[in-house]
Image (cartoon, grey):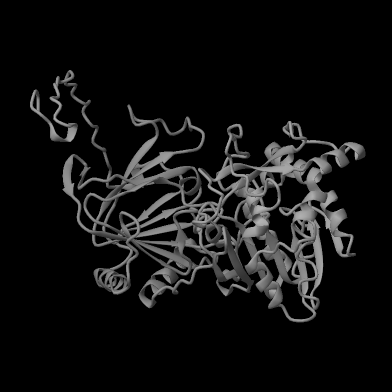
């Protein structure tokens, strides 16, 4: 191409000069031992020839007879409970087949190894072709108990362990290895991870087509691994979920406290209802006891006169305007609801989740919904969508947004007379209107279902898109798969405690700036 006309560049003649060629440093090959006794990883045990050749063939044939999930770079199958690779957690809501008979027999044999009546209720089959691997990870501590078993079929492989906890002086690292250990998993062997090997060391398989074992190159062949685990009931909500981030205090709580009468004028009094929510309420039988978590100005009270509703909201001014028609309300937080467990036939969590700024807080709110429901009870969850209808005036360029609300002049004057406290960010415009910025986390497709999937003892009855919102209807149930299961650790779901947003820009979404456009859409 040097000096020649290039059609892709409109006939221009590129002049090419090469940069200095730098050879990459030589890649260190793994040094492995075939004997686990020489590998100092506390809690790691390797049982060779755990299954016979005949049992291996039966297990492999059984797995290959089932359908493989090919959404990952490697093929997988799940039994008992599926694992959601988007949430990195067990999916409690998705249907999943039980362990096939040959795999169930292998799982029963593990009880003799682990002792104490240990019983696997989940199995994941992974297929590794030459060149495929898996990144370093620790099996979820909030989803699975202290024992993990990995049975290798059809082929052997080198697995790399790396310490992720505090360095241990008793286990010196080899030169350049930085506390890494390479372990050969022979064909038909069982790897047992417990203690520090389970919680403080990650394990991985490098993506390559051969391994170096005791100085010789061993080509890889197809390998199928069966990982047996025991799923735990979700543990307590982590304390970080109960701490309200400043962005919610300033851009949610303070805003709604200030605009409560205007909000009620443009919503509750004008009966601006979300279609699927009204449909859900109309379907409830006479005598239903409903908890409306995040009831706001009570606009959904009274839609179904046969329903007895209790409303809860964080904003006292909103509760005051909702009390005008005389409804039962109380002040509280959606992530820690002060109501009795299992007492309600139905629960609403509408227009709440998109005002919670962390994943832990959103998950805590959904767990509270499940806690409030009696077995067989149903809940409606609904939140703003990132994906908007073609005719909508709202357009979001990201999931964490400031959405403007403009308080009209007459309400501003009324606030001044009543000395209503204002958020620090509120701006009085030349027109006399007051402009507020509300924090919103808009949900993308599938995100609400993923959030619900982390909650035990519920199933998704219905879900979809409803005029700019994603919704899910869930039902409370007793999950027999979790009978006798222990409780997981209160581990955070990994999102930062609070979001950091750029300052609002001109032309930012204003779907409710004057309280009229949303009404027209509805």
Q: Quadrant of residue 190?
A: bottom left
Quadrant placement of the C terminus: bottom right
Task: Judge by depth and name the residue closer to the eye, 202 or 191.
Answer: 202
- Residue shown at the point (62%, 54%) measured from the top left: 363
Question: In the image as oriented, which residue stretches furthest toward the bottom?
Answer: 286
Looking at the image, can residue 236 be seen? no
- Residue depicted at x 21% and y 52%: 130
Q: Position of residue 360 (x, y in %)?
A: 62, 49
Q: Position of residue 361 (x, y in %)?
A: 65, 49
Q: Which residue is drawn at the image coordinates 13% and 30% (left, top)? A: 11
Does residue 138 show up?
yes
Picture mark count: 0
Relative to 155, 135 lies left or right: right
Residue 348 spot, x, y in % from top left: 70, 64
Left or right of residue 498, residue 89 in this image: left
Q: Residue at x 51, y 49 (%)?
A: 195
Q: Position of residue 386 (x, y in %)?
A: 53, 51
Q: Quadrant of residue 38?
A: top left
Specify whether 484 is left or right of 72: right
Give the quadrant of the N terminus.
top left
Q: Is residue 48 above or below residue 513?
A: below
Does residue 262 appear left or right of residue 77 in this picture?
right
């Amino acid at each position: 191409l040097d000096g020649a006309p290039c059609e892709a560049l409109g006939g221009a003649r590129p002049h090419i000069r090469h940069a200095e060629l730098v050879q990459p440093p030589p890649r260190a090959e793994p040094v492995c031992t075939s004997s686990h006794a020489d590998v100092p990883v506390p809690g790691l045990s390797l049982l060779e020839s755990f299954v016979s050749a005949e049992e291996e063939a039966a297990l492999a044939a059984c797995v290959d007879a089932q359908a493989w999930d090919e959404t990952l770079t490697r093929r997988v199958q799940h039994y008992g409970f599926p694992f959601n690779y988007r949430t990195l957690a067990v999916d409690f809501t998705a249907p999943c087949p039980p362990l096939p008979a040959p795999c169930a027999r292998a799982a029963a044999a593990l009880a003799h190894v682990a002792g104490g009546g240990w019983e696997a209720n989940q199995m994941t089959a992974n297929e590794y072709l030459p060149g495929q691997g898996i990144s370093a990870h620790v099996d979820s501590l909030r989803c699975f108990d202290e024992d993990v078993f990995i049975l290798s079929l059809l082929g052997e492989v080198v697995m790399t362990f790396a310490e992720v906890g505090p360095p241990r002086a008793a286990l010196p690292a080899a030169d350049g290895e930085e506390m890494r250990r390479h372990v050969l998993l022979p064909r038909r062997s069982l790897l047992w991870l417990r203690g520090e090997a389970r919680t403080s060391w990650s394990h991985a398989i490098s993506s390559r087509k051969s391994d170096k074992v005791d100085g010789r190159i061993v080509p890889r062949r197809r390998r199928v691994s069966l990982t047996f685990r025991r799923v735990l009931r979700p543990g307590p909500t982590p304390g970080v979920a109960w701490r309200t981030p400043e962005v919610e205090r300033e851009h949610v709580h303070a805003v709604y406290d200030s605009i409560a009468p205007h909000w009620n004028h443009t919503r509750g009094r004008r009966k601006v209802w979300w279609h699927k929510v009204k449909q859900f309420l109309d379907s409830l039988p006479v005598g239903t006891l409903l908890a409306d978590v995040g009831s706001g100005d009570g606009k959904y009270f009274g839609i179904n006169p046969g329903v007895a509703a209790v409303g809860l909201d964080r904003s006292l001014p909103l509760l005051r305007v909702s009390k005008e028609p005389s409804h039962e309300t109380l002040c509280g937080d959606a992530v820690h609801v002060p109501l009795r467990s299992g007492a309600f036939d139905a629960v609403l969590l509408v227009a709440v989740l998109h005002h919670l700024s962390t994943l832990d807080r959103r998950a805590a709110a959904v767990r509270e919904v499940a806690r409030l429901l009696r077995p067989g009870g149903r809940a409606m969850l609904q939140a703003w969508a990132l994906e908007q209808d073609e005719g909508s005036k709202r357009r979001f360029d990201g999931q964490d947004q400031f959405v403007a609300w403009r308080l009209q002049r007459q309400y501003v004057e009324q606030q001044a007379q009543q000395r209503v406290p204002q958020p620090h960010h509120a701006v009085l415009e030349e027109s006399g209107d007051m402009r507020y910025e509300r924090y919103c986390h808009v949900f993308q497709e599938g995100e609400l279902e993923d959030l619900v999937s982390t909650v035990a003892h519920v199933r998704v009855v219905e879900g979809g898109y409803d005029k700019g919102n994603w919704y899910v209807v869930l039902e409370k149930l007793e999950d027999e798969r979790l009978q006798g299961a222990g409780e997981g650790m209160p581990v955070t779901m990994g999102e930062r405690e609070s979001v950091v947003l750029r300052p609002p820009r001109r032309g930012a979404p204003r779907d409710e700036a004057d309280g009229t456009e949303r009404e027209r859409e509805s």
